[in-house]
C-alpha cells in the first residue's frame, strides 16, 4: 500500500464539506466588499520567489529544474497575484481589488493543523497607500473570522517602517538593515548574540576592523595602539605627523569601514523597540519615549498607527484582543509598513498580512502601493468547527420498485430533482426496494423517491409520510416542485 507523502493528507468527504462551507463564506464576504476573483497557476518560475520572500521561506520552496527551467510550486499567493497584475491588470482603474483561494506548498515540519500543502484564501488591495486601505484589509480579515463563527481571537499589529526609520540614521548596508529588521522576533527570543552570528556570516570576523574593540571609546583604542604598536616594532615616525595623529587617523578610518559599532547600536535600539508590546496605548508611549530620548524623528509610521487604531474602533474588538507589537517581523521580507497576524485562543495563526509598497516594482511593474492578507483555510476550519451541511435534508435516493418500473423514468426524475437543487442519487445496481431503503438509512438519506410502474411515491423515512403521484411528465414536474417546496420549508 502506498501512503500519502509526509506532510500532506487526504481530505475525506465530510472534511471537504466543512472546508468548502468556510471557503464559500469567506469568498462571499470578499465578493460583497468588491473583490474580484483571480486564479494564478500553482507552478511558477523559481525566480519569482527569490526577490523578496526572505531566506526563511525560500528555504521551504519545493523547487526543481525541468527541461532547463528553474521552477517552483508556489509557497504563497501574493507574488503570483502581483505577477499576474503586472502582466494583465495594471491598466485597470485604481484601486484594484482581487481575491483568491488555492493550494500552496511549503517544506515545513508537520505539526497540528500545519501541512506542507495547505490552502490560502485572501485578498490584495492594489494602488492605494495609507491607513484607510490598511484599515479596510484588517477589518475585512476580522469580519471573515466572525462570518465563520470565530469570535474569540487575538489581533497583533506592528509596523516595519518604524524599525527602518530607527536604522536609517546608522551607517549600515541595506542588506544588514534588512537582516536586522527581519530578525527582531529572534532578537527578542534568543538575544543579540544570535543576530551577531548571522551578521558575522555577512561581514566575516572583522579582519582589520575594530569589531573586537566595539565596546571601547576611540580614545581608549588610540591609547592601546600607541602602547602596543611600538612594542611590535611598528614605527610611527617619519610621516611628518605625530604618533597620536597617525593612530587617531587609523582609528577613524577603521571605524568608518567597521559596521560593528553601528550594528551594536542598532541591536540596542531594536531590543528596546521590541519591548514595546502589549496594550496599544502603553506600547505607543514606550516608543515615543524611546524616540524622544534618542532625539529621533520618525513621524510617518506612528501617525499611521494612530489613525489605524482610531479606525479599528468601528470593528468593535473585545477588550484585550488587540495587541501592538513593534518587534513583530513575520517571515516574508516584502513588507514595508503595517503588518498583522490573527491567532486563535490556542495561539495558532489563522491569518496574516500587511503592506508591501515595493513588491510590484521589485517584480518588474510600476511603483504601486499595496496591502493584503491571507487565511490558512485548514486552521480556520479547525478553529471554527463549522457544522457540516445536513446532507439528509439535501439528498434524495431515486429507486425503482419492481422490474416493470422504467429505469429511464427514474433517470428523468433524478434529473428533474437536480434541476430543483436537490442532490439526487440514482440506484444503478437494480436492488430490491427493501435493500434500497436500508441503504438510504445507512447513508443518512432522509427521502426516497420510488418509481413504480404507474406511480411515483415520495417517502420521508423520518416520519413515514408518503406522497403518491402519477408516473408521467406532469407527475414528475409536480413532484419536483413539491419536493423543492418541502426542502425550502425545512431550511
Image (cartoon, rainbow, N blue to C red):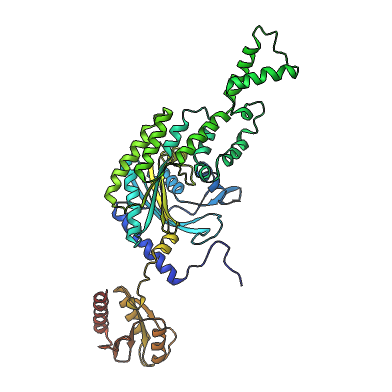
Q: Identify the image quadrant of the N terminus.
A: bottom right
In screen coordinates, is 255 left or right of 302?
right
Of 145 and 185, nearer the camera is: 185
Q: Is residue 365 visible?
A: no
* Residue 32: quadrant of the picture: bottom left
Q: Residue at 38% of width from left, 63% of height from top?
A: 384
**Image height of 175 relative to 223, above or below:** below
What is the number of callouts on the image?
A: 0
* Residue 236: quadrant of the picture: top right
* Residue 277: quadrant of the picture: top left
**Image height of 458 relative to 244, above or below:** below
Q: Identify the image quadrant of the C terminus.
A: bottom left
Q: Residue at 43% of width from left, 68% of height from top?
A: 16
In screen coordinates, is 313 left or right of 6?
left
Of 73 and 218, nearer the camera is: 218
Q: Residue at 28% of width from left, 45% of height from top?
A: 311
Extreme-right residue of the structure: 233
Extreme-top residue of the structure: 240
Q: Position of residue 79 (x, y in %)?
A: 46, 46
Q: Position of residue 98 (x, y in %)?
A: 36, 50
Q: Is residue 268 visible?
A: yes
Q: Position of residue 45 (x, y in %)?
A: 53, 47
In screen coordinates, is 94 left or right of 163?
left
Q: Position of residue 334 (x, y in %)?
A: 46, 42
Of 463 and 380, nearer the camera is: 380
**Image height of 231 relative to 325, above or below:** above
Amino acid at each position: 500500500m502506498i501512503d500519502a507523502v509526509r506532510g500532506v493528507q487526504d481530505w475525506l468527504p465530510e472534511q471537504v464539506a466543512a472546508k468548502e462551507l468556510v471557503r464559500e463564506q469567506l469568498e462571499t464576504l470578499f465578493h460583497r466588499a468588491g473583490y474580484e476573483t483571480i486564479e494564478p497557476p500553482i507552478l511558477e518560475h523559481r525566480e519569482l520567489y527569490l526577490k523578496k520572500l526572505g531566506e526563511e521561506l525560500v528555504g521551504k520552496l519545493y523547487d526543481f529544474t525541468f527541461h532547463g527551467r528553474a521552477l517552483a510550486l508556489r509557497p504563497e499567493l501574493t507574488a503570483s497575484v502581483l505577477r499576474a497584475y503586472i502582466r494583465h491588470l495594471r491598466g485597470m482603474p485604481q484601486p484594484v481589488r482581487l481575491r483568491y483561494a488555492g493550494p500552496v506548498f511549503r517544506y515545513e515540519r508537520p505539526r497540528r493543523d500545519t501541512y506542507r500543502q495547505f490552502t490560502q484564501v485572501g485578498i490584495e488591495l492594489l494602488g492605494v497607500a495609507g491607513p484607510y486601505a490598511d484599515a479596510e484589509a484588517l477589518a475585512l480579515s476580522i469580519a471573515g473570522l466572525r462570518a465563520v463563527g470565530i469570535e474569540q481571537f487575538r489581533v497583533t499589529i506592528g509596523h516595519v517602517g518604524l524599525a527602518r526609520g530607527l536604522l536609517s540614521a546608522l551607517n549600515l548596508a541595506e542588506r544588514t538593515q534588512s537582516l536586522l529588521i527581519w530578525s527582531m522576533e529572534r532578537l527578542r527570543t534568543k538575544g543579540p548574540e544570535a543576530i551577531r552570528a548571522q551578521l558575522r556570516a555577512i561581514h566575516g570576523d572583522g579582519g582589520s576592523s575594530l569589531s573586537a574593540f566595539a565596546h571601547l571609546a576611540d580614545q581608549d583604542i588610540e591609547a592601546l595602539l600607541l602602547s602596543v604598536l611600538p612594542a611590535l616594532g611598528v614605527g610611527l615616525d617619519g610621516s611628518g605627523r605625530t604618533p597620536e595623529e597617525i593612530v587617531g587617523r587609523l582609528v577613524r578610518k577603521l571605524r568608518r569601514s567597521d559596521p560593528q559599532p553601528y550594528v551594536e547600536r542598532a541591536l540596542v535600539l531594536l531590543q528596546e523597540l521590541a519591548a514595546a508590546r502589549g496594550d496599544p496605548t502603553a506600547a505607543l508611549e514606550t516608543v515615543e519615549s524611546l524616540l524622544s530620548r534618542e532625539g529621533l524623528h520618525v513621524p510617518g509610521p506612528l501617525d499611521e498607527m494612530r489613525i489605524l487604531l482610531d479606525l479599528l474602533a468601528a470593528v468593535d474588538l473585545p477588550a484585550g484582543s488587540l495587541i501592538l507589537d513593534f518587534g513583530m517581523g513575520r517571515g516574508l521580507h516584502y513588507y514595508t509598513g503595517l503588518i498583522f497576524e490573527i491567532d486563535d485562543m490556542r495561539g495558532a495563526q489563522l491569518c496574516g498580512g500587511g503592506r508591501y509598497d515595493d513588491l510590484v516594482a521589485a517584480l518588474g511593474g510600476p511603483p504601486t502601493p499595496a496591502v493584503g492578507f491571507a487565511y490558512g483555510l485548514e486552521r480556520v476550519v479547525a478553529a471554527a468547527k463549522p457544522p457540516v451541511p445536513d446532507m439528509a435534508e439535501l439528498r434524495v435516493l431515486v429507486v425503482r420498485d419492481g422490474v416493470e418500473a422504467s429505469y429511464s423514468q427514474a433517470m428523468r426524475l433524478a434529473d428533474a430533482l437536480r434541476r430543483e437543487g436537490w442532490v439526487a442519487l440514482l440506484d444503478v445496481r437494480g436492488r430490491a426496494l427493501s435493500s434500497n431503503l436500508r441503504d438510504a438509512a445507512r447513508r443518512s438519506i432522509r427521502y426516497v423517491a420510488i418509481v413504480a410502474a404507474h406511480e411515483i411515491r415520495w417517502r420521508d423515512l423520518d416520519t413515514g409520510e408518503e406522497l403518491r403521484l402519477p408516473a408521467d411528465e406532469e407527475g414528475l414536474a409536480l413532484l419536483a416542485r413539491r419536493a423543492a417546496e418541502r426542502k425550502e420549508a425545512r431550511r
